[in-house]
Image: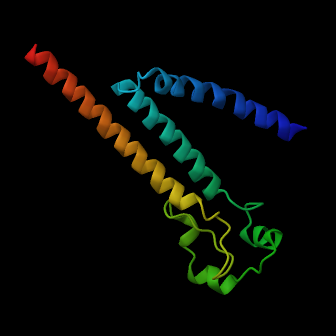
Amino acid sequence: MSLIACALLVAAPGLLVLWLWGRPLVDGRWRTPGWFLATAGLCVVAAAGTWFVGAFSGSSLDPEESCHAAGTTYDSAYRSTHREEPSRLFPLHNRCNATYDLVPAWVNPTLVLLLLLTTTCLVAAVWLIADRRAKARRA
């Protein structure tokens, strides 16, 4: 029951944000710097959530316990050889052994795509602001 309540607590504000964000797409008012800045903000929030999922992947904070819960073997020799890997900010890895990673495979590509989309939206917003200023100077 608590899973359903948590899902509703996340889904209701998420749907509201998506509706407020998507409405200018339908109306044709998306070509404004504010829309691109809002999209960049949404991408940053989504990237932070994705990073959080990847950084805290596993069933517990103990990697050995998480590996056993995932049904794979924990290789302490591999972990000691690659001890810096789980503490890096990017790319995210938390490997049990040489072949199994607790971080889902979609996390790192999603982070890259969201950060590229953020950068693209910020560049578009700056370009639109500069274009409006240039048009104002000409007028």
Query: Quick one: quadrant of the N terminus?
Result: top right
On screen, residue 61 versus residue 106, left or right, reads right
Tell me where residue 102 appears, x and y as whole percent. Answer: 68, 67
Extreme residue in the left direction: 138
| 47 relative to 25, above or below | below
The residue drawn where x is 63% and y is 69% is: 94
| 60 relative to 52, above or below | below
Tell me where residue 121 appears, x and y as whole percent. Answer: 37, 39
Location of residue 86 by image quarter? bottom right
Query: Quick one: quadrant of the C terminus?
Result: top left
| 76 relative to 113, above or below | below
Location of residue 120 by image quarter? top left
Tell me where residue 19 appears, x and y as whole percent. Answer: 59, 25
Viewer-proximal residue among 85 and 80: 85
Extreme residue in the top direction: 139
Viewer-proximal residue among 37 and 86: 37
Location of residue 100 by image quarter? bottom right
| 67 relative to 112, above or below | below
